[in-house]
Every structure is written in C-alpha cells, then in structure tokens.
Image (cartoon, rainbow, N blue to C red):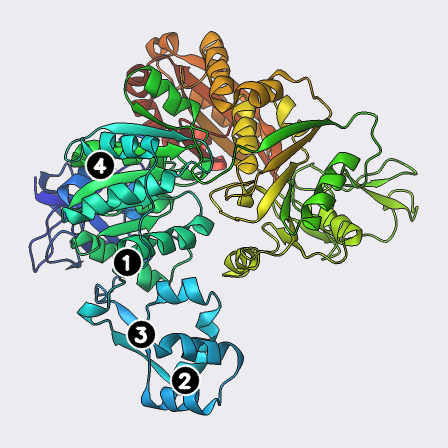
Amino acid sequence: MPSVLRVALPVPLPTLFDYLPPAAGEAQAGSRVLVPFGRGKAVGVVVETDVESTLGGARLKRVLRLLDEAPLLDAELMKTLAWAADYWLGAPGEAYANALPLALREDKPLPDTHEEVWALTVAGRSALDAGSRKGGSRRLLETLAAAPLGAGELHERLPDWRAAARRLATAGLIERVRRAADTAPQPAVAPPALSPEQQAAVEAVSAELGRFQPFLLDGVTGSGKTEVYLALIEQVIAQGKQALLLVPEIGLAPQTVRRVRERLGVPVEVLHSNLAEGDRARAWLRARDGEARVILGTRSAVFTPLPRAGLIVVDEEHDGAYKQQEGFRYHARDLALLRGRALGVPVLLGSATPSLESLANVDAGRYRALHLRARPGAIRPPQVQIVDMRAQRLEHGLSPTLLSAVADTIARGEQALVFRNRRGYAPVLLCHQCGWHAECPRCEHPLTLHAGRRQLICHHCDYHTRLPEHCPSCGAPDLKPQGQGTERLEEALSARFPDVPVLRIDRETTRRRDAFDELLERLRGDGPAILVGTQMLAKGHDLPNLTLVAIVGVDEGLHSVDFRASERLAQLIVQVAGRAGRASKPGRVILQTHHPEHPLLRQLLAQGYAAAAKELLAERQAVQLPPYMHQVLLRADAHQREHVDAFLREARGALEPAAQAELGIAGPMPAPMPLRAGRHRGQLLVEAGSRAVLHAALRPWARGLSALPSARRVRWSLDVDPVDLY
C-alpha cells in the first residue's frame, strides 16, 4: 500500500482524506496543502504523514501544492484540535478549519505580518493646515497629526474612521506605512492600588505561573476583576510570555483593548469577526510567531497559537456566547482549559455570576476559588427593591414606582437604565374584534411588531411582512399591540421625559458597524439620560453616571420549560443590576414582577447569587441534570415531519443494545419549538452519569449516522454538552 498524507478538509464529514504527497516539497503535520476535491480544489491541513492507505495507489489523488514550508499549526494545537473534534463529535475538517482565520483557509500567500499604520502625507499636512477638509475627514487628519495610528487604535478613537480614510487615501492625503519599531503604545495610566482581596487573587495565580491550574475568580459586579487580569498580564509579559484574554461579546472588546493598552503600554492583537480578514490573519500570525504579547478576542480566539504561553483568562465565563451553536459545536471556555493543561499555564475564569458547571468544579476540587466581595470606590452595593405589579395601574408596562424613580434620577442629573430583554415595539399584534393575532407562517409563533419599520418580524427565522391596515381575518381596523419591547418603552419614556435624551441600545440600533461604541460614548458624560436596552447592556460596561437600573419583564424566565432558565435569569438580574452605582454615586435597582414572592427572586434579594446558585445546584443534583449528568443532543429538521421522525427512530435503533442499557435516552420527540423557518424539528437526548461511558457509546454511533437510509432526507447535528435545548 502507498504511503500517503492524511488531510483534514473543511467539509462536514466525519473523516480525514488520503492523498499522495506533492511532487515538490515535504509536507509536515500542521502544514496547509492544496488538493483536488470533487470537481474543484480545497485547502486542507495535513494531520498525519507517512500513513499507510487502505486504498490502492491508482485511486488516490496527489496533493497539488504544499502551501507552507513550515507547519502553520504547532504540535500542541494539532493535538488539541484532534481531541476537541473527538470530544464534541465534530467533523475533524471543520475543527481544523476553525483554528484558521478565513484568509488563511485560501490558496493565497501568507500576508505580511508587519503592522501597517495610517499616516499623513505632505499633502495631508497642507490640507490640515489650510482647513480644506471638514467633518469626519478633518477629524481623521487631526487624529493622525500627532503620530501614525493602526486600525485598532483608530477604531477606538474614531469609530467611523474608515469612510473618511477611503476618501483621504484616494485624494493622496493619507497613506499606509509600516509602523516603526519605536512607536508602540506607552503606558498612559498608572495602576490603581489593589485591594487586599485583589492582591490575594493576584498572588494566588502568580504562584502558579508556569504550570496548569484552573482558577475561578468569583467577584461581585464592580469589584475590579479586570484590574486582577491586568496585574497578572503585566507579570506575564514581563517574563517575555504571552497572555490570551477571551471576552464573550465583540462589544466588550474595544473598551478592554483600550484599558490594556493604556495600562500596560504594549500592542494588543485583537481577534473577532468584525475585523477585516487581512487584519485578523496578520494578528493570528503575529501570535503564532511569538511577537504578539497580549491577544484579546471572542470565542474563536481560543484557537490562537501561543508558542510562549503564560496565562489564559476567560472573562464572563458563564456567558452562553462561548458555546458555538452551529457547525463545530465547541465551548471556548472548556477548550481554554484544555489548552491551559496542554500548554502548562494557569487558566483564570472570571465572573460575577459563575456558571453552575464551574461552581460544581470548585466543589469537586478541580478549580480553586478566588473571591472579590467588595466594590473598590463604590459607596455601597446598589439597593434592590422588588415592585409588585399586581393591581397597579401601569403605563406601557411601567409602574408608578419605577417612573417616579426615573424622574428622581434625572432630576439629580444622573442616568437610568430601563432593561427589557425583548426588542421591537410589541411581541404580539392582536385583533380585539375576532381574536386574530399575527403569526409567522414558517414557525407558528407570534410575529413581533417593529413600529418604526412598519413591519412584523419573526425573531426566530427573520420572516418579514408589512404591517396590515386591517385585520386579515375579519377586516376590523383596531389592531392592538400587546406587551412591550424596547422600541415601545423608548417611545413611552421619550413622551414622558421630553427634555432628556432617551437612547435605545438593542440589535436594531446597533446594526451599523461602530454604532454600539458611539451610543456608549454619548453616555460617558455627566448629563442626565435614560437608556432602554436588552442584554447587550448587561455585561462589563462602566457608565459612572448610571445610578438607577429598572428591570422589567423578568416573569417569562420564572416559568420556562428549560431547566437552565432559572440560572440564566439569576445571572441576568445580577449582571444588569451591577451596572448601577459603579463609581462614587450610590446605586438603586428596581425589579418589577407579578410574582414578588417567588423563591428565586427572594433568595437573590436576601442572600445574593452565591446562595441562589447553591440552591440551584442542589436541585440539579437531586434530579440528575447537568453538571451532574452529561448530555448529547441529536437534532434533526426537514420539510416533512415524517422524515424527521424516521431518521430519529433509525438513529435510536442504531445504538448498540449494550450501550442503550448504560445510557438514558429521551425521544425521539419534537423540539420545544417544533417548526422553525418552515422546517419540522425533532431531537433525541442521550445522557449518562459518566463522560467516558457516554463517549465510548456514542463515538461509533456518531460515525454511522450519515450512513442511515433516512439521513439524506434531513439536516442533522450532534451537540455535546448542549446549553440550549431549543
């Protein structure tokens, strides 16, 4: 049999592919190759060399070209990716592809890793002196007058700089040049004195630098977790090593980058999906070469090569955004821990509301807990008040107590946040004559009214339709919106407080690049303002003049069929409440509910998140739910329900009888949302008390699913450790 290369290709198939070595060059594991695939070509990653193929030489195709003289992925990352593909039961080619920025998955030369910056030309200086440019163009010329700046730095200072840069570059007033070695950022902000709790946390992690140890930094909102991160990163880069800092949302990246640059005076490489692909690839390559000292990014940044690794930090570790929900369904927090073990470095998980999984790992002795219970600089924790909405006269869902508190806050020149985790104007449009309501024809769920766009939109499948003038069923003209979304609250508060800026922050108002940063920048001043927002505002944003947080619409989370709903609601309430009173001014939190005696709300109010989480963990253990039970969810969808049911029945039957005896199996059953985007959905839940038992049974089963006769009629996926059963 011929000796071949085993190659991972970016296709959703549970296999690697054998190819004859290229005519020129010697491929190594971790190198990219261009290969013939089907009727076209594909870029793959060599996983093994000198493998004996089971296919005859006449049936094998030859690698067209070796793309890398040296491996692009190092041995640690290759081993980690192989483990990850096995654990999350993913297609190996998709796992390896996830590790590479999009620009490196193409048949193109590697980009130059020297950082490019924008600089004024001679003509640009003349234009600035002459005052011939106005608006955004002039602001960009003024910003570049002191020194050339890179894209990341410009993004922080002028979020809308790109359009002006195109105009000025076309006119020859600015140009791209390589950054000189001596123009790296310099420390601009002296570090604050650490509190005793912060200092103890820094010392505990410092003592483990150079070896693997997971830590959970459990700190109340505003307690200074970021200062702990910065102090540790400073130590790591002083040792000539690299630090990786993960954040859950793109919106948190700019402010964190700014703090790191100002405090530590080192360039920060940023990796997230809003970056230009060339910039992302250059940052990844600088990390791979060991040049990048600090790497900050969202979920996919966990795959960044770290040849000089010193520390990995996962901020807001509880956040569901760390779980990839399509394709290769990995969890970045768990993968960060795996990489920390392989690299021999500590991993610091931080949160004000730790996940139940992490708290269970602390209880089991797998993680070490560090606590920050005080809020440096704050007068006291915010006062929390539960408002009973029963028998109250509400204005657009807002109680008199809440409206009075908002009025008092803005009268003091301070800012208030009214939090509602539902965008749009109203979640239901109803006919009072006949009872008709607007429903998505593809999901059988109510359509949300977006009044500003005069449209009805499905938030599950993005179906759009025009707002009808009359009831489609009986022709009556009085269609009434039911319930409140952020758009309706914005309208009501603007009418109630016409002299105060009311800013809405949700997916609708932040669609444009940089819009989120621009809205937040308007709130950093001292003037009064009212914010209306969704959970985009729940995480990590410091607004020193924000002293009131009013949370409306929490009741939906109290009665959900999802066993994780209570945990998520508790986390959301604590995170949103933590936006109030983060500086020297005292904060206040108002929580509106029709269920003021609910045990979860009362426990959160009286004893805090830690006690509520302990109670939730006890409940999970009593009924054997995660993290005390390990789950794999097989999802399937198709245009016809019978195809879904047939596939799931065959899939269950394909499990070996011995395996079925060791596993808990629920289903086949419809998904909690049985119809979405016109496709019928079903699932099969498989669980076991031991990960080893679960994976031993499911590995051969997963490889055989695509061969089932009914598999071609459905789309299916496997989700290991699912965080969403929908």
Residue positioned 64% across, 22% down in the render: 559
Between disc 4 and disc 1, the foreground one is 1
- Tell me the residue that label 3 is attached to: 148
Q: Of the residues under marks 2 and 1, which one precedes in the sequence?
A: 2
On residue 170, the disc is 2
Q: Label 1 is placed on what type of residue? A: Pro
Label 2: which secondary element = helix
Q: In percent of the image, x 29 and y 28: which residue is there?
A: 215
Q: What amino acid is labelled 3 in the image?
A: Pro
Q: Nearer the viewer, residue 702 or 576?
A: 576
For the question of whether residue 85 can be seen, the reply is no
> How many other residues sit within 10 Å of disc 3, few (<14), some (14-19) or many (≥20)?
many
Give left or right: position of 151 versus 321: left
Q: Are marks 2 and 3 in contact (CB under 8 Å)?
A: no
Q: Looking at the rendering, in which quadrant would you find the N terminus? A: top left
Query: Which residue is identified by label 4?
Result: 80
Residues 348 and 175: in front is 348
Q: Picture quarter containing residue 659?
A: top left
Q: CA distance from mark 4 to mark 2?
A: 45 Å
Give residue 187's mark. 1
Number of numbered callouts drawn: 4
Q: Could you tell me which secondary element the residue under label 1 belongs to? A: loop
Residue positioned 30% across, 45% down in the render: 230
* Among the 4 quarters of the image, the one containing residue 196: top left
Looking at marks 4 and 1 on the same chain, the residue that comes earlier in the sequence is marked by 4
